[in-house]
Amino acid sequence: MPKKESVPQNEINDLVTAGPSTGASSSSTSSTSIDTALTAAENYFLKKDVENLFIQLQKLETTFSFKHIENKDELVVLYTGLSNKHIFNALFGLLNKFEINYYLNWRVERIEPQDQLFMTYVATVTNIFVTWLHLLHEVIFEGLMSEVPGRAKSFACAPECLDQFPNTRMIINCTETYSELPNDMDKQGETYSHYKYRSTFKELVGIAPNGVITFVSKLYPGSTSDKKTVEHCGILKIFKEGDLVIADKGFLISDLLPPGVTLNIQPFLLEPQFTPEQVAMTRNIARARIHMSQYEKQRPLSDKELLEIVANWDYSDDDFDASDNDKEEDEYTEEFDVNNMPIVFEDDGTVINQTLENEVLIEDVTEDVVEEVIKEQQPQINALERKQEEQIRNIVWKKKNLVLNEDVLKFKGNSDLPSSITDLSTPFQFFRYFFDDTLFKKSEEESNLYNVQKNPSRPSAITTVDIRQCLGILIYMSIIHLPNMRSYWSQKIGVSVIKDTMSQKRFDAIRASLHFNDNTTVKAINDPDSDRLHKIRPVVDYLNTKFATLPFEQFLCVDEQLRATKARHYLKQYLPMKPHKWGFKLFILSGVSGLAYKFEIYTGTENRCRLPNEPDLGTSANIVVRLSKGVPHNQFYRLYFDNYYSSIPLVSYLSSIGIYSLGTILRNRISNCKLPTEQQMKKESRGISHEYVATVNGSNISTVVWKDNKIVTLVSSFTGQLPVQEVVRYDRKQNKKVTVACPNLVKEYNRHMGGVDCFDSLIGRVHREQNEPLISLAAFRIEIAECLCKVDTRTSTAKRGRSSTNDLEKQIQEKKKRGPTAYIPPKDIRTDATAHCCVIEL
């Protein structure tokens, strides 16, 4: 509250002496004059208080700007570092001549341009923050971690579980910290952790045997391996000769450790089961490493404990003053000889026996083998490919439209189905077209070979008929669900058709012996040519060969599919956007009608299978290249895919072999992109689109961005923005449907991209014949299962007289019109000419 001022005496006297015009005075008049004077004085003080408070309020509402300090040179120097206001004004006058484009494309209007420059020079807060932050890092972090205690000091308070490892210097492990998802796709890949399933930063933590954290590394991207983290973090400089390091199986760092330093990790399972010595060693190491997790999760220090540590910074109460630079005696060497203890571990699939002297023994590895592997892995990029890569990096986009001539877009291929397909009429005939005797013969040979390998003295023989019947029973089981497999042969709830086909003992024997490939030809995991689908690879290749006999449609698409399963397998994937979230992931090349032409089961190693003449366009783009190998070139087929596969090199490569392509694309995959940013497009009205065209390796490629409910970016080699069409959309603000402009390539993409989705929907319903209605998938599978179990499975009997199959079929067709009175077997069983009753014509 401001100090009250005194009222001028002359004003008070005038108020007191003022009276009636008659000049008469009385006691009442005197008292009234005094009250009036006091009221006037009180009003005067209140008026002064209001004025002072108003001035203070104006000062509080006024922002801090350059005008407040421009007349005081010492304040100008303090806040800006410039000598006086004249230099500042001269600099502002120079910069004000240019147009200012703000970094995030939003204008600053409430702050004057002069004060914006002033804010740029005010660095006091930033200076203080950065200074104290670095001070805390140097004192608290680098000060504590600068010296690592020696073995004797670290073992003073070690737990009993480490008594078997007295030379232990440090227990190391990596921990990960969650981070925000970067906008850059490359940084997303670098920070993505396959262990945490999100973006993280990794750091290496070292704990002494007594539980004290003695080493913390810098942060590394989450995808960095444990071995690379150890190699670059500087921890190797800490270890001395005779030290023992305990880690988990992921730290295959024996080749990085200094001479005389031993690594102790749990043994790998190289035999069907661990030996008793390996079990004991695994248990002891696990008991020692469990303290790592306990100390990582221990409670934070209280304020009182922190004050005690700071107050006694240089005080030690463990009676040990030895550091790494002091000489110390190792009293445990005689009790536990680490030098003669070999460590067996697995480095990338190769078993290595390493002792303290770092003697690495790798069998069957010669210089010729190493040179051959290096030669195979060396990139085979010729001068033309390097020139094409340079053109892609230096793309020049121009604001124009891509419109091709109808003659250029005319389809030159043939998509008519052959008569071998159109003549098929029954479900079993369709099944036999794709699963003929070639596949069953292959399974018969490999299954009998496996039986001989398993039991040479008494191998059980399996025939093609047995395999077909077993497959038919499995299809029945997929339709008829019972508590367990034995229930299908139960006397009470069993299925008669299964019991009549095969005994349970025979079914179990066939199922245990069923093979499609030779187990002796399996290659090691670390082999570049290893195949995770080795056991079913002949089936996959055979089906793709049969699918390739179908003529391709003009409009093709590539997309992923998830085959749901509850099996426990390392190839099972999790896709949260799919109806069935867990299963095996497949990449499928399909037509717009839903017909699949080629598929590929995801195993994570498919990118190795690349021919020498095929370009390496990236992991996702190479999937499209592999699936489209069978598509005829220069016939102007059209291929569609989404932004998981799309890239400019992929569209350019497909265009060079005569295959048009169209797909959505991520903006960061477009080199030198000139399309408006997402922030700029959000300011536009709905339906606005922009197109830029560039020539890449002799092919015209168009990129279009369109605003609908979201911002959509597409790339194409045969169509663009024109002709602009219209689509109907619901407008929430107007609460009605409105017409929105739509580029032509968006309509083209939506019309032909759903081939794989159509394939998924067709799985649930099957066409029987063109003139008959749809049948359910269950009915389709039941008929196939019945034919597999009964066709060509019984011994034929001799017939007399002339065959009357055609007459019998005519009678059955006539009987259908009246309605059958009894069950009629499928046509494939009726006409197999095997073990039917004799028909004698007189």
Image: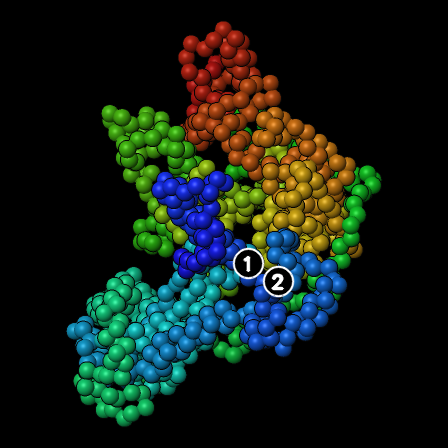
- The answer to whether marks 2 and 1 mark residues whose Cβ atoms lie closer than 8 Å is yes
State the quadrant of the N terminus.
bottom left
Q: Residue at x 48, y 51 (%)?
A: 14
Q: Which residue is mark 2?
A: 115
Residue extending farthest left: 160
Q: CA distance from mark 2 to mark 1?
A: 10 Å
Q: Position of residue 811 (x, y in %)?
A: 52, 11
User: Hey, which quadrant is residue 150 in on the image?
Assistant: bottom left
Q: Which residue is mark 1?
A: 63
Q: In the rendering, which numbered label is found on residue 87?
A: none
Q: Position of residue 529 (x, y in %)?
A: 51, 61
389 displayed left or right of 316: right
Would residue 242 be seen by someone viewing this image from the given angle? yes
User: Hey, which quadrant is residue 522 in on the image?
Assistant: bottom left
196 displayed left or right of 405: left
User: Hey, which quadrant is residue 98 in on the image?
Assistant: bottom right
Q: Residue at x 35, y 71 (%)?
A: 205
